[in-house]
Amino acid sequence: MSHPNATIDDDHATTQDVGEIDLQLVAQIVRRAGVDCQVDETPAATTLHARKAMGDPAWTVIAGISSDPSTPLAFIGPTDSTRTRLLRDPDERRLAALIVLQAQRDNPHELLTHDEATASGLADNMIWR
């Protein structure tokens, strides 16, 4: 994924490839927001699990990154659901904010809604299906 950086080339800002999303950094941001989480790394995939602090003893949220580098996508949803929300061109802060939003729902076992994401300023780049 490319993000603007401070490099100036011929008086124009340039972009640089900054690599994959760092789920450990996402986990740090989520924890600072007061949500419990852990990153599970397996050979097949790396996922992040989250839940309200002092809430449900089971993980209520799952999130992760697409393994296809040509299509940068992240997913966020309830742990026990077969459906997730997708985020195009994810970055660590936006992914962390969506994880916190999902975890803090009255019922975190249901998908976050378009209205909730819009009210939080997080609906951009979301895929709603």
Image (cartoon, rainbow, N blue to C red):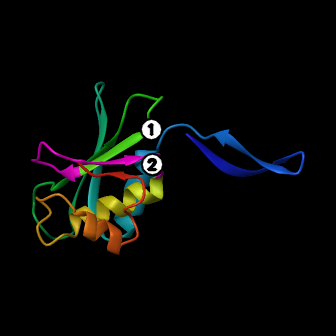
Residue 93 is inside the magenta segment: no
Q: Which residue is mark 1?
A: 72
- Most common SS among magenta residues: loop
Instruction: From this view, report whether residue 43 is shown above or below residue 34.
Output: above
Query: 99 or 4, which is in the foreground?
Result: 4
Q: Amino acid at mark 2?
A: Pro
* Residue at 30 percent of width and 25 percent of height: 43
Instruction: Specify the label residue 90 is tagged with.
Output: 2
Q: Quadrant of residue 10?
A: top right
Residue 6 position, x and y percent, is 76, 53
From the viewer's perspective, tell me whether residue 17 is left or right of residue 59: right
Q: Between disc 2 and disc 1, whose residue precedes?
A: 1
- Say what secondary structure mark 1 lies in: loop
Asked if marks 2 and 1 touch (Cβ < 8 Å), the reply is yes
Q: How many marks?
A: 2
Query: 49 or 63, which is in the foreground?
Result: 63
Residue 74 position, x and y percent, is 36, 44
Q: Which residues are magenta?
A: 77-91
Instruction: Specify the label residue 27 is tagged with.
Output: none
Instruction: From this view, report whether residue 107 is shown above or below residue 21.
Output: below
The residue most toward the front is 129
Q: CA distance from mark 2 to mark 1?
A: 7 Å
* Residue at 42 percent of width and 48 percent of height: 24
